[in-house]
Image (spheres, rainbow, N blue to C red):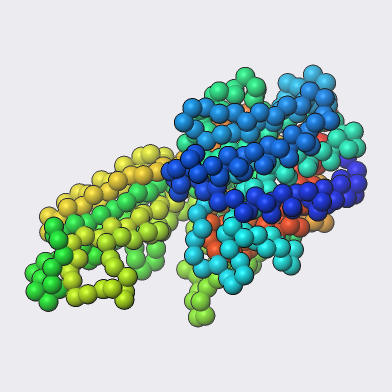
Amino acid sequence: MDQLAAKAFIDALWDAEVIPELTRYIRIPNKSPSFDPDWEAHGYMEAATQQFAAWAEGKIAGIEGASLEVVRLPGRTPVIFIDIPGAGGEAGADDPVLLYGHLDKQPEMSGWSEGLGPWEPMLKDGKLYGRGGADDGYAIFGALSAILALKAQGVAHARCAVLIEACEESGSYDLPFYVDHLAARLGSPSLVVCLDSGCANYDQLWLTTSLRGMTGGSLEVQVLTEGVHSGDASGVVPSSFRILRTLLSRLEDETTGEIKPSELHDQIPPGRIAEAKAAAAALGDQVYTKFPFVPGMHPVEDDPTELILNRTWRPALAITGFEGAPAIQDAGNVLRPATAVKVSMRLPPTSDAEAAGERLKALFEADPPYGAKVTFNVEQAGQGWNAPALAPWLRASIDRASQAAFGREAAMMGEGGSIPFMGMLGEKFPAAQFVITGVLGPHSNAHGPNEFLHIGMGKAVTLAVAQVLADHLVRAD
């Protein structure tokens, strides 16, 4: 592949078409089904799907044998499936590559800066602000731009199957049905490229080597059938909030944040510790300065390596929702009847997420203090993933790709979030190699306010994917 020519092609295509298309897409509030149960009636998911499909159909129209289908199973979110024949003869046809992304979005979230908003795109300083551009709307454009860059040069590649789902932010619960439905057309990919991950900086290509699992649910403590005067009841009726704190302390050391039950931990492989040390050496304090700390605040550790391991291989608790209390300005002198929180538990990549959820339920509900009514409803479980060892050809390819795109070798690190699709694919295609990468870097703030797509990073990742696709076909040589 002529890297300079490919870069020029990708830059031009992104400037002329991709950025305008993503700008349109950001305006569509196609929230994932967990956040919009009436997604089908609202029609936003359909609008985003049709927009992406229309652009992609136009780009593959001149490729002989290429096809695109919006696949729909009853009662499930749609999937865009694009099949582009290989240019490498039988080897290319029988040795496919699967490229993955999603188009559903997280909800709005509060706290956007003045002039910015989740559904109002803003192009500023090389960044496209708005919900979904980086997570993960750019994926279909990046995948097809990479393939088209190879086509423009006549560079051979294997058959490419592009799969774009609309349920990832809800845990990809629809996706297994589509993978089974499309099994014959997917074949047995020897390489999986996922564009729904992050990067620790915008200066090199980052490969995600592991993903934490996740479990969680709603924890409620009820002490009364109705609220009563706090002056009358306090000191007699235990506070539901105090009992809730006690229950959470069974799980987490509130002083250090360490998760107490040993069965929720897993041993960290030595190779992943070595990767964390190398990443820490490259990043230094960027490991934590990317977060918007308030003045005077500091991270839980000073050692960047330990922070990386905390974020990628150790379990951690977050309370993401709270119910049962009025707003402060509406809070009277009432001892409330109940308190409930949303528990979000990140797990080591190799943990059994289903078993962890059951462990939390048993931990919280056993022997409730004062005989309070304690209920924990497990709402989600996403299996983590630990990548297979990189084949020598792929290790060399990603470094070549990173040098082409950034002038610097690639780096590897685990991610703290979950991509449920990866664990499922790892089981279905145990012999496949994985390139898990993305554009969500410092301050890009996926799921939060002021989310943005770093356009330069998007272009560079696209160029890197093109290089890997070219190398994949000729790896035997």
Q: Is residue 382 above or below residue 342?
A: above
Q: Quadrant of the N terminus?
A: top right
Residue 295 shown left or right of residue 453 in the figure:
left
Q: Position of residue 83 (x, y in %)?
A: 71, 28
Instruction: Say above or below: 23 vs 96.
Output: below
User: Residue 123's image quarter?
Assistant: bottom right
Nearest the camera: 380 or 174? Answer: 174
Left or right side of 417 for 242: left
Please state the horizontal and vertical placement of residue 288, each as a whole percent of the image: 57, 67
Q: Quadrant of residue 343?
A: bottom left
Looking at the image, residue 431 lies above or below residue 409 = above
Q: Quadrant of residue 141?
A: top right
Residue at point 62% right, 39% down? 49
Q: Nearer the viewer, residue 279 or 152?
A: 152
* Residue 181 is at least partly visible in this image: yes
Q: In front here: 254 or 469?
A: 469
Residue drawn at the location 22% of the way across and 56% of the way down: 221
Q: Give the image location of residue 305, x and y in percent.
A: 57, 61
Is residue 192 something that shows in the picture? Answer: no
In the image as oriented, which residue stretches furthest toward the bottom? 296
Q: Is residue 416 left or right of residue 80?
A: left
